[in-house]
Amino acid sequence: MSIPTEPFHEVGEQAQIDADVILGYRYPGDSQPTRIGDYAIIRSGSIIYANTTIGHRFQCGHQVLIRGEITIGNRCVVHHKCTLEGRLKIGNGVKIMAHVYVPSRTTIGDMVFIGPGTTFLNAKYPMRQDGVQGATIEDGVTIGGGVTICPGVRIGRGAFIGAGTLVNKDVPPDTLAYGVPVKFQPMPEVLAGGNLPEQLLPQTDLFGAQRDDSWRDEVC
């Protein structure tokens, strides 16, 4: 079966798309073009499959792979060499740092930060049992670097996961989680109050000249 090679994507206004980007990558059974909102910044080497919808002010790094049947909200960032497998739901204001792996059937809420090198899993007994179940990350969660998140766990709203943690069970809301395996303690005052919108929502670049204060009008 041959896969059509004509463009299969719709991109909003004022997009910045590097050379060597593939949008609307076709696959057997796809049905809808890739749709990306206004002011997108998509860097070289990235591939975004058909049947994926992304909101306004999306930004991704180099060599990002985003597969099919994914919904991503507004003002999200996916940094270099991340892999997002198909059938995901990602909310608004999510920042995913470099080298993160997110398998299918994972759900990520709004205003979530995911540190570099974090790995999500979706099969407790891979190749020995049928079916997959991804994790559910509720709104306002922070996940440190190098974390492993096991299949089917739920991380409650506003939780903070320390670097290197093995999350092998549900994390209560507004809890500090750390260790291998994970342990819990009440949220320290210095970490209370949730993720800061000024850290997650502006569409900025350490090596670029753009400045974006438009988010302030959207959250007021």
Image (spheres, rainbow, N blue to C red):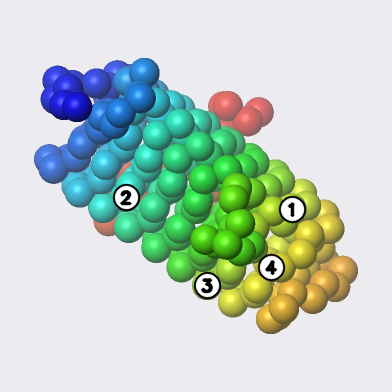
- The amino acid at mark 1 is Arg
Instruction: Please report whichever mark, 3 or 1, sits nearer to the chain's N-terminal start.
Output: 3
Q: Nearer the viewer, residue 206 or 174?
A: 174
- The amino acid at mark 4 is Val
Instruction: Please report whichever mark, 4 or 3, sits nearer to the chain's N-terminal start.
Output: 3
- For label 2, the SS is loop
Picture disc at residue 218? none
- For label 3, the SS is loop
> Distance of mark 4 from mark 3, alpha carbons?
11 Å
Question: How far across and how far down the image is residue 172, in percent?
Answer: 84, 58
Q: Residue reaching furthest bottom?
A: 180
Q: Which residue shows up at 45% across the image and 60% down it?
A: 100
> Distance of mark 2 from mark 4, alpha carbons?
25 Å
Query: How would you rate the neighbour count of disc 3 (Cα within 10 Å): few for under 14, some for 14-19, many for 20 or more?
Result: some
- For label 1, the SS is strand
Q: Which residue shows up at 74% across the image and 74% down it?
A: 182
Q: Nearer the viewer, residue 161 or 39?
A: 161
Instruction: Choose mark 2 or mark 1, whichever is in front.
Output: 1
Q: Which residue is mark 1?
A: 154
> Distance of mark 3 from mark 1, alpha carbons?
18 Å
Q: Can the viewer see residue 21?
A: yes
Instruction: Choose mark 3 or mark 1, whichever is in front.
Output: 1
